[in-house]
Image (tube, rainbow, N blue to C red):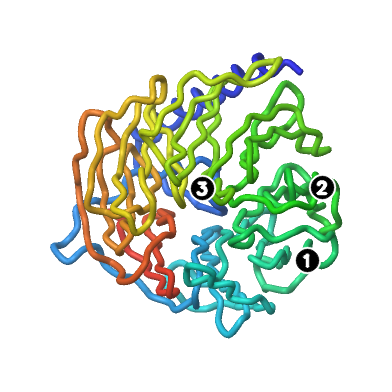
Amino acid sequence: MAVLKTMRAVAVTLGLGMCLLGLGRAGKAVAADWPNWRGPNHNGVSSETGWSTNWPADGPKVLWRASLGTGFATMAVSNGRVYAMGNINDNDILYCFDADTGKEIWKKSYPCPLFNKDHEGGPSATPTVEAGVVYTFSKNGDIVCFRADTGDVLWHRNIVKEQGIKHPTWYFASSPRVIDNLIILNAGTNGIALNKADGKVAWENGKAPASYATAVAFDAGAQKCAAIMTANEMVVVAASTGKIILRHPWKTSWDINASDPIVSGDTMFVCSGYNKGCALLKIQQDGVTEIWRNKNMSNHANSCVLWEGYIYGFNGQVGGGGKLTCLDHKTGQVKWSQAGLGTGSLMVADGKLIVLGESGKLVIAKASPEKFEELASAQILKGKCWTVPVLANGRIYARNAKGDLVCLDVRR
């Protein structure tokens, strides 16, 4: 497989995307949906521009609030609707809200234990909206396909009961990743894929416990691939068949690999918590080599974002005084590090970091390697906040573990 040629093609594609983003900045404000985990490009970066950081002293206007129930799944926004999840009385609930008003359009539930092992529990996987349907994945192995407009269930599978896939220690957390006609999940030893049409298994790579990151898609020549952080290694599989193409050891304490790999050109950035650290891998035709490895970034719960040659993320464990950190992608060297937000989460839009601190403080900062520069901030939630905030169409959505969801107006 001509992996090098392919990864260079990926770099060209990413470069074109950056050019388009630049054109968007030069013109009027551009709005964008956020239909799945890590956004439309699956990388934590939004193409949205023209939103405001000029907030009143008490923060941006609250458009609406909702109560979801316990959980950590972030929100998906598509076609004027917001899809969010929580758990109440051992039932996972998928809500569909009107993005403008917060009015509940529909909600559907299915039985699922809370699974509150060492944390509050509830769903961790973000709903995936694609081609008029919504896919969800529960901690207990339920994959459910709903009609996006009505909430009608089109099919419901459980890979634990039907396939004998074993739970990981903290139960399933991978968000559904759609590649062509398949839904790929980080479940089982080295991933599993279901057909979109009916949920039947297309391929599986073993039944051992998985880890917690979501599969990342990229092209290798004419072949579509998925990079999966498993319990003990990073594997690259052919998306259509599940055949393992490349693998690289990445063992952590308690088999926790929770952050997604970042593919850029012929490289892949991997990062894990529990003092494991991070590495930049070079993907080659005959295998994988490490360009650099250090402990300057250690993602415990949420993924980093790569923006214009620099990596932004939280270094440290939740509850342990983590720091928002900027690394040079090429060298792994720290450009700056900022304390005070615990171990939170972030996304990038219009050259700005949108950061939610572990205790509910929302911060907007410049995405610059020069220094940490805060542009705006507000305390928007109370309690534990491990869930990534979402910007979509001039609104920021954020939630806490209890299930308090807030929609903020940041339109100019």
Q: CA distance from mark 3 to mark 2?
A: 24 Å
Reply above or below: 53 against 4. below
Q: Residue furthest bottom?
A: 89
Q: Mark 1 = which residue? A: 158
Tell me, yes or no, whether the two marked residues, 1 and 2, touch with CB atoms within 8 Å. Answer: no
Local crowd at mark 1 within 10 Å, few (<14), some, or many (≥20)?
some
Please give the label number shown on residue 344: none
Q: CA distance from mark 1 to mark 2?
A: 14 Å
- Residue 10 screen position, x and y as percent: 59, 24
> Observer-nearest residue: 409 or 30?
409
Name the N-terminal-most of marks 1 and 2.
1
Question: Is residue 173 toward the left or the right of residue 226 in the image?
Answer: left
Looking at the rendered structure, the secondary structure element under dot 1 is strand
Q: Quadrant of residue 236?
A: top right
- Residue at coordinates 65% horizontally, 78% vertically from top-left? 109
- Residue at coordinates 63% horizontally, 62% vertically from top-left? 171
> Observer-nearest residue: 394 or 182?
182
Amino acid of disc 2: Glu
- Residue at coordinates 70% horizontally, 53% vertically from top-left? 209
For residue 397, say whether it is visible.
yes
Q: Quadrant of residue 393?
A: bottom left
Q: Mark 3 = which residue? A: 38
